[in-house]
Image: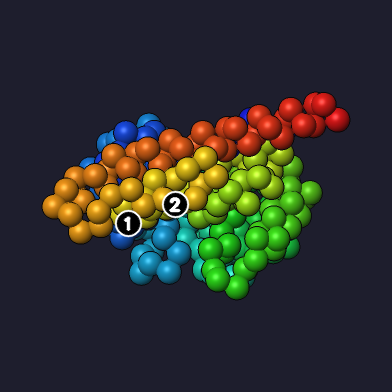
Amino acid sequence: MGDPARVFVASAMPTDYPYKLQKPSTVSDRVRDTADCFIMDSGIGDDVSNSEVIELAITHDADYVVGKDFLHEHDRTTESVLEFLNLLDDSECDATPLIPLQPPYHRHYKQLEGFDHYVLGGMVVDDVTLQEKINWIKEFRQVEPDAYTHALGVGGGIRFVRQIAGRGLVDSVDCSTPERAAMFGCVLDDELRQNECRVWNGDGASKRNIPLAEFNSWQIADVWERESESEHTQTTLC
């Protein structure tokens, strides 16, 4: 079974949490400086070019950079990724490229085989079910079991965690859940349920957002670790 997945937070707050992802429309030194490992996302749907994403990765000293992709469009995403890689080769950017795939990933992979790092996108839409997400990831791992794989935007729900953690299906995930919950005065419990714990419109609300977001970030990371260990224990006993 795999090690616990690293949980990145899609972040806009300077919390004391080491794994963060930002997109062009939200990236800032204020948040970047709090991260030990940083993903410069291309922000699907953002009005930004591959060149601009690469420049932002250089400016913010990103560890990983994601090529520009297009929601549920294989051919258009592939064309963009090839452009991204050519531009990256000619740049001074030393961030590791994350190659974006759109679902179904095992089919899109045929156009972009042979890379060491992939990011699986296109799952954060209302009409995609949990089971579809799980199936897409499993099908991808059947054709590419070895590459580093990041699942984009799907790390914050307990049902997803319990079906993915500890199974070697992903190496990292990200979600905005910790900070979104904090903005509404909520803490995440050990089942990742959001429980309101502060007065929403009190004078101190904004002062409490960052501490709540920080707690929530570590909580999700710990839940992923717990579920990974649980899956490993169950498999070993069987």
Q: Nearer the viewer, residue 74 or 29?
A: 29
Image point 58% across, 62% down: which residue?
A: 123
What residue is shown with label 2? 194
Question: To which quarter of the image does residue 183 belong?
Answer: bottom left
Q: Are marks 1 and 2 in contact (CB under 8 Å)?
A: yes
Instruction: Give the Cα separation between the discs numbered 1 and 2.
Output: 9 Å
Could you say which disc has been placed on residue 206 in the image?
A: none
Image point 51% across, 47% down: which residue?
A: 192
* Residue 95 coordinates in the image, percent (x, y): 43, 40
Specify whether 135 is left or right of 219.
right
Q: Is residue 209 above or below residue 1?
A: below
Could you tell me which quadrant the N terminus lies in?
A: top right
Mark 2 secondary-structure assignment: strand
* Residue 193 coordinates in the image, percent (x, y): 49, 50
Question: To which quarter of the image does residue 168 belong?
Answer: top right
* Residue 223 coordinates in the image, percent (x, y): 55, 37
Number of other residues with Cα within 10 Å of mark 2, as a class: few under 14, some 14 to 19, many 20 or more: some
- Asked if residue 18 shows in the view, the reply is yes
What residue is shown with label 1? 184
Q: Label 1 amino acid?
A: Phe
Q: Is residue 192 above or below residue 103?
A: above
Q: Label 2 amino acid?
A: Gln
Specify whether 85 is left or right of 233.
left
Could you tell me which quadrant the C terminus lies in?
A: top right
